[in-house]
């Protein structure tokens, strides 16, 4: 199996193994935004393992947050003549031309977790991101923000999912009479931008009834900043991805909620779909619907996320094996032996 990560950021750095043996196998290529976000490594590992079991080889590259590098990677995959390219895009709007080149060569395209817009791709598979936003707002509403005021520290404005999350979040805000005091985007999902907001807007933070963070990485930096102001644990903070540190903060009481997205299910389903597309099969299943990418109606699979709080973290996170109990409760040793 050809498996290239981290340092392999451009086509010329890729070394394929067992080329002769693999010529008759389905070839799948993956281009990741980066591996800064904890969950992407898990997505990668499950996808590669599943695809290998189904008889395919997978070549993985990391664009390290560089849009031009991601385009170069896709161009390389086109020259290599792979069967399917799976993309975790950096900028939803920037890849249309490059993707069209791939399609012209008969290569199937899957947008993984983040939509590639206006490109008529073969599949967009993700979690229901509007529901993610809904769950975030509902958690804040239940924890003191109903009829109050919140701050939104959102992710990258280039990520189409951010728009969907915002839509779901604001629907609940309207329903529950919640005023959005302020809203900013964190370019490149850089968590320091969220932390800087806490330091630079102390007055706004003090009158807020809750903070929505675009993901758990942002939430972690926000909570560190709140700790310095002795507000951590008193001001509800929500995120998404169920990162280990976020789960630790939940049991410690400094983060109110995270959204768990069963990435094993997503990665396995994506690998199965990649194999089917490579074989020229039509995607089937009760989960396959359509969504508009801005220009075209394309096949879409949106899996259901799960809201995680202190009340259900053992059931959802630990019993599922997503994180170990001793890791989640690392800073609360007496809970490990319960």
Image: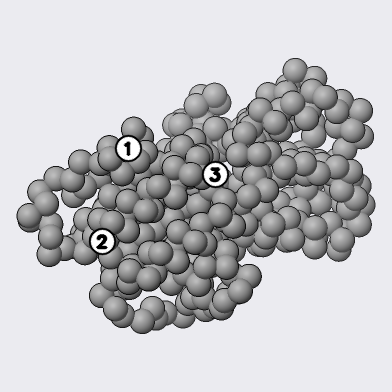
Distance in Å between CA atoms under marks 3 and 1: 28 Å
Give the labeled residue for mark 2. 81
* Among the two numbered marks 3 and 1 on one chain, the one whose residue lies closer to the N terminus: 1
Callout 1: few (<14), some (14-19), or many (20+) C-alpha neighbours within 10 Å? some
Distance in Å between CA atoms under marks 1 and 2: 18 Å
Please tell me whether mark 1 sits on a helix, a strand or a loop: loop
In this orientation, which residue lies closer to the viewer: 58 or 117? 117
Callout 2: few (<14), some (14-19), or many (20+) C-alpha neighbours within 10 Å? some
Q: Which mark is residue 8?
A: 1
User: Going 10% across and 49% down the picture, which residue do you hit?
Assistant: 18
Q: Nearer the viewer, mark 3 or mark 1?
A: 1
Q: Position of residue 28 (x, y in %)?
A: 29, 59
In this orientation, which residue lies closer to the viewer: 11 or 182? 11
* Residue 14 makes an appearance in the image: yes
User: Going 91% across and 57% down the picture, which residue do you hit?
Assistant: 177
Looking at the image, which residue sits at the far top?
228
Looking at the image, which residue sits at the far left?
20
Q: Quadrant of residue 296?
A: bottom right
Q: Are marks 1 and 2 in contact (CB under 8 Å)?
A: no
Above/below status of 120 relative to 22: below
* Among the two numbered marks 1 and 2 on one chain, the one whose residue lies closer to the N terminus: 1
Callout 3: few (<14), some (14-19), or many (20+) C-alpha neighbours within 10 Å? many
* Residue 321 makes an appearance in the image: no
Give the labeled residue for mark 3. 242
Please tell me whether mark 3 sits on a helix, a strand or a loop: loop
* Among the two numbered marks 2 and 3 on one chain, the one whose residue lies closer to the N terminus: 2
User: Going 31% across and 44% down the picture, which residue do you hit?
Assistant: 11
Q: Are marks 2 and 3 in contact (CB under 8 Å)?
A: no
Q: Nearer the viewer, mark 2 or mark 3?
A: 2
Q: Nearer the viewer, mark 1 or mark 2?
A: 2
């Amino acid at each position: 199996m050809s498996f290239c990560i981290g340092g392999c950021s451009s086509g010329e750095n890729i070394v394929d193994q067992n080329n002769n043996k693999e010529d008759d196998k389905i070839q799948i290529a993956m281009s990741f935004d980066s591996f800064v976000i904890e969950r992407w490594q898990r997505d990668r590992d499950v996808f590669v393992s599943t695809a290998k079991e189904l008889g395919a080889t997978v070549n993985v590259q990391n664009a390290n947050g560089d849009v031009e590098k991601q385009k170069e990677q896709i161009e390389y995959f086109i020259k290599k003549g792979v069967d399917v390219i799976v993309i975790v895009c950096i900028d939803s709007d920037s890849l249309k031309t490059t993707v069209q080149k791939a399609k012209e060569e008969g290569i199937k395209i899957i947008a993984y977790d983040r939509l590639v817009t206006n490109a008529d791709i073969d599949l967009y598979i993700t979690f229901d991101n509007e529901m993610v936003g809904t769950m975030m707002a509902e958690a804040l509403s239940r924890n003191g923000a109903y009829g109050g005021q919140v701050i939104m520290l959102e992710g990258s404005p280039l990520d189409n999912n951010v728009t969907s999350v915002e839509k779901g979040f604001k629907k609940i805000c309207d329903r529950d009479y919640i005023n959005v005091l302020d809203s900013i985007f964190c370019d490149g999902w850089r968590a320091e931008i969220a932390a800087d907001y806490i330091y630079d807007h102390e007055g706004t933070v003090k009158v807020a009834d809750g903070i929505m963070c675009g993901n758990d990485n942002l939430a972690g930096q926000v909570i560190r900043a709140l700790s310095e102001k002795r507000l951590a644990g008193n001001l509800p903070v929500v995120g998404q991805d169920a990162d280990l540190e976020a789960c630790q903060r939940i049991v410690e009481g400094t983060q109110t909620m995270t959204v768990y997205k069963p990435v094993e299910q997503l990665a396995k389903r994506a690998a199965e779909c990649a194999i089917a597309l490579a074989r020229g099969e039509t995607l089937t299943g009760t989960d396959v619907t359509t969504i508009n990418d801005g220009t075209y109606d394309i096949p879409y699979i949106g899996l259901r996320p799960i809201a995680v709080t202190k009340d259900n973290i053992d059931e959802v996170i630990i019993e599922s094996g997503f994180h170990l109990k001793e890791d989640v409760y690392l800073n609360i040793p007496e809970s490990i032996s319960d």
